Image: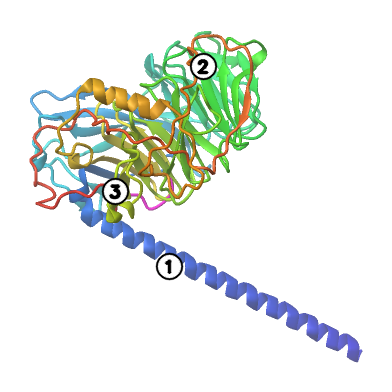
Amino acid sequence: RTRETMAEGASKAAVDAAAGDGAAAAAAAAAAQEEAEARVNEEHKIWKKNVPFLYDFVMTHCLEWPSITVQWLPHKQELPDTHIIKQQLLLGTKTSGAEQNYLMTGTIKLLDENANIANLKLHYDDTTKEYGGYGALSEGEKTIFQIDSKIVHEGDVNRARYKPQDPKVIATKSPSTDVYVFDTRKHFSTPKPGDKFNPQMRLTGHTREGYGLSWNPVKSGLLVSGSYDSLVCMWDTNVPQPVLPALQVFKEHTDAVEDVEWHPKHEALFASVGDDRRIVVWDTRLEQGKPSKVVAAAHTKEINGLSFNPFFEYVFATCSSDKVVALWDLRNTSTPMHLLRAHTDEVLQVQWSHAHESVLASAGRDRRVHVWDVSRIGDVQSEEDAKDGPPELLFIHGGHTSCVSEFSWNPQDPWMIASVTEEPNILQVWKMTESVYAPEEPAPPAATATATATATMTTPVAPQPTPTSDATPASAPKALPTPEATPLAAKPAATPVVSAPPVTPVVIAPAAPAVPEDTSMDGVEEGEVREDEPPPSVVRV
């Protein structure tokens, strides 16, 4: 009995010690969480104080439920006898089953290019959770953003994309295995009591949920989707069927497909990326769904997104959980052309600007949206400027306090971006100050700028033996021979599989930077928002 009593006592002491250790660990974790939240809040306060110096426009709106998808709709409406225009954003709710979900559109009121931006009072309203206000312009135009239509949706809206040829047609992805297609003309702007989920089409073919979704911008009606079942499915939505099976299923990935995108100029080409670290280029003209090109181990971790350059048909970008954005040339994918490094956590999305051939943006879990200008790769930096990042890093948007779920370039305003976060339920629309992207320097001739951008972005260069950064060294590296250009419209004959060494930065020979066309708003006088202080090369708080 004595031995049993002693054993029981020792066991109880061990349990108590373990419980004590667990409580101590929980307390330490809670303290670390509080410290991290306090740091984020302090950074956000500093950002808010600097808003008038960093931006020409900022709006922060707190949504009722978070949206993890956002896309600008292409049209705009000009209000007569005012300097105000209306644009719409495509959004969707993520209630995680707590309430009914909706596919939504919201209207935002913006100043046109002829308005005097000095009349816009940038301030933060604790009641509406918004920056800015147009009350000074018109007493009847005080609401900057509002939700103006809702369509009942089954499950969270993982992704929503409008059809380029008909923006009233919208495809969505959800936790369900199916892809849904809605025609907004067949739905009321405000759901009535008892309204049920009623998409115009239900597209089948996947066995798991996902996020990758892309409409063909060249051939109307073709839609591709990528999901966690490692499949890429394609449908022809011109076939009017309530339930439409996949026209073709593409199998090459060995893990979740995170993103898909059609080529902006060629109707038969699209690409997909996934957790298997592969980039797969597909040509729908090939038989049996065979890939046109496979890049194995393109990054060191999962690839989360890709984007084709709308100006140069061979150039595309990818982003990864390895914190890197990589630039590629379709003609030679054995190694990336250049690596963009500045993010401090996983990069979830990358997207080229529709208006400037050398500009792209990226966003991720580090709460930042980075805007890059690759025409500045190799520019000489001062030691102070180099601390803020490489010369191609143009701007860092630090207005979010959590992971940036998605962002979208405004098709009507080349430098305006909308971005959303899941926690808190924040939508931000913002435009960096003009002095960041349009410095007071004489612009080179248009032909020279275009030639420079083309040479910089489409010619892979040999890696240096012992690179220390992604910046170009003083001695320009010797370029590899330009790969033979195979027109993308030509039908490929084989399926090359290459393995890219992503950890070796590839530098690009320095070239005169291409100055983007100044499409900023008129009426902005120098010194109105930033006094006499010259802007830094990278705006960062």
| Residue position marked by numbered label 2 in the rendering | 269
Q: Are marks 1 and 3 in contact (CB under 8 Å)?
A: no
| Residue position marked by numbered label 3 in the rendering | 381
Distance in Å between CA atoms under marks 1 and 3: 34 Å
Amino acid residing under circle 3: Gln
| Residue position marked by numbered label 1 in the rendering | 35
Q: Earlier in the sequence, mark 1 or mark 2?
A: 1
Give the residues in magenta.
Answer: 399-404
Instruction: Kindly indicate the quadrant of the structure image that contains residue 35.
Output: bottom left
Instruction: Kindly indicate the quadrant of the structure image that contains residue 218.
Output: top left
Q: Position of residue 335 (x, y in %)?
A: 53, 33
Q: Residues within 10 Å of mark 2 (few under 14, many from 20)?
A: some
- Residue 245 falls left or right of residue 150: right
Asked whether 502 or 480 is in front, the reply is 480
Amino acid residing under circle 2: Leu
Quadrant holding the N terminus = bottom right
State the residue at coordinates (17%, 43%).
133
Q: Is residue 64 above or below residue 199?
A: below
Q: Are marks 1 and 2 in contact (CB under 8 Å)?
A: no
Quadrant holding the C terminus = bottom left
Asked if residue 63 can be seen in this view, the reply is: no
Asked whether 345 or 492 is in front, the reply is 492
Asked whether 263 or 311 is in front, the reply is 311
Q: Position of residue 253 (x, y in %)?
A: 64, 29
Q: Is residue 401 magenta?
A: yes
Q: Position of residue 93 (x, y in %)?
A: 44, 38
Q: Position of residue 132 (x, y in %)?
A: 19, 45
Q: Which mark is residue 299?
A: none
